[in-house]
Image (cartoon, rainbow, N blue to C red):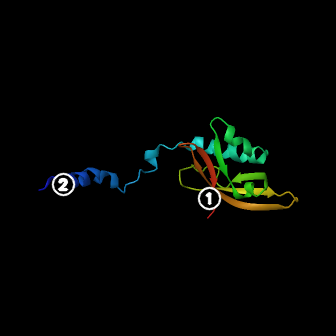
Amino acid sequence: MKPAMLFALLLCLGSAGCWSSERPSIDDLSYDSSSARTALLAALDAWKQGRAAELARRKPPIRFADEDYIGGWRLTEYQLVDPEQEIRPFQGVRVNLLLKNRKGQTAKRLASYQVSIRPGMAVLRSDP
């Protein structure tokens, strides 16, 4: 076998492990549901208190993204649909929201949030 072909073969075999399609299971990620719940409640409480912009300056900071918040709606009340639900990565947490806009109009929404705690804390609206 020619040296160039041998080198190419070894390179291919050596990189085969990099092409693995296996993903770590949720259990392997050692996700802390309690920390995720704390982040979710902190984000919703901050929005309700009109202090959501301060979430980025917390220690640790929480990235918060919600289309109604961005649209200028104020959160007046919220309730977790299943308060006992264990929060897991990549799974939505359903929350009933009561909102009010600048004109005083109210709206009820069923929202879904995904909560990340690593590498940084994030609470992101992920409605279907």
Q: Which residue is the site of mark 2?
A: 4
Tell me if mark 2 has few (under 14), some (14-19) or many (20+) residues whose alpha carbon lies within 10 angstroms of its own.
Answer: few
Across and down, in percent, residue 90 comes to 53, 54
Across and down, in percent, residue 115 comes to 59, 49
Location of the N terminus (image quadrant): bottom left
Choose top left, top right, bottom left or bottom right for residue 5. Answer: bottom left
Across and down, in percent, residue 6 comes to 17, 53
Choose top left, top right, bottom left or bottom right for residue 16. Answer: bottom left
Marks 1 and 2: which is nearer the front? 2
Side (left or right) of 84 relative to 100: left
Identify the residue shown where x is 75% and y is 48%.
Answer: 47
Location of the C terminus (image quadrant): bottom right
Identify the residue shown where x is 55% and y is 55%.
Answer: 91
- Amino acid type, callout 2: Ala
Q: Are marks 1 and 2 in contact (CB under 8 Å)?
A: no
Tell me if mark 1 has few (under 14), some (14-19) or many (20+) residues whose alpha carbon lies within 10 angstroms of its own.
Answer: some
Secondary element at image label 1 = loop
The label on residue 49 is: none
Q: Which residue is the site of mark 1?
A: 126
